[in-house]
Amino acid sequence: PMKHIIVAVDFSNATPGVLEMAVSLAKSFGAGLELLHVVEPEPSYTAYGFTPDEFPAMNAFHEEAQRRAAIKLEELLATVKADVPGATSLMTEGSPLHALLARVKESSADFVVIGSHGHGVIASLLLGSVAEGMVRKATVPTLVVPAAPEK
């Protein structure tokens, strides 16, 4: 039986469809729902030719991005709780694919819902790299929800 569904959210145009699908699955199966957002780690700015004097500004920018992501995640969780009262959210840092695979393992999730991105005609033929990687490496059933077409 499906008990714990992880839904990966990245606040892109794919997110509304992904959430809708995950919520309806959770309701149908009486499963728990976890919204997972992965923040990419702060890059090593030396690689980009920045000097250590410039790091504090970069660091502040990264922290602000994380703060905004946390707020967005809470807002999404609030909308989901109307339908799935026990839903939870988690923000973690790392490479999106690895962080998602690790979370699936550690939470004993038995189903994953993820979005693929539509960015123009060519790109929409290819899944986003995280969705593609998830389909190849998934240890549990994974549903890929296509992004809504660009208007």
Image: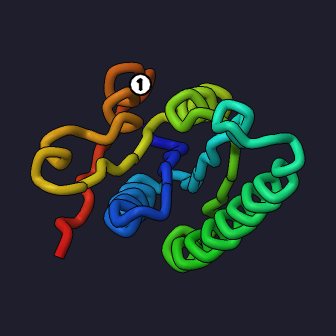
Q: Where is residue 63 in the image (x, y as percent from the top left)?
A: 79, 59
Quadrant that contains the C terminus = bottom left
Determine the residue positioned at 32% across, 41% down. Answer: 128
Q: Nearer the viewer, residue 74 or 108?
A: 74
Q: Is mark 1 on a helix, strand or loop?
A: loop
**Percent position of residue 54, x then y:** 82, 51
Q: Where is residue 21 in the image (x, y as percent from the top left)?
A: 33, 60
Q: Is residue 97 above or below residue 36?
A: above
- Name the residue rendered at 36%, 32% in the picture: 141
Q: Crowding near pointer 1: few (<14 within 10 Å), some, many (20+)?
A: some
In this rendering, would 139 be left or right of 70? Answer: left
User: For the N terminus, which image quadrant?
Assistant: top left
> Which residue is at the front of the view, 4 or 145?
145
Indicate left or right for 32 with 119 as reference: right
Q: Viewer-proximal residue, 146 or 49?
A: 49
Count numbered badges in the picture: 1
Instruction: Determine the image quadrant of residue 25.
Output: bottom left
Q: Inspect this view and state whether residue 113 appears.
A: yes
Viewed as shown, does residue 12 lie left or right of 108?
Answer: left
Residue ID for mark 1: 138
Please name the residue shown 68% across and 62% down the image.
65
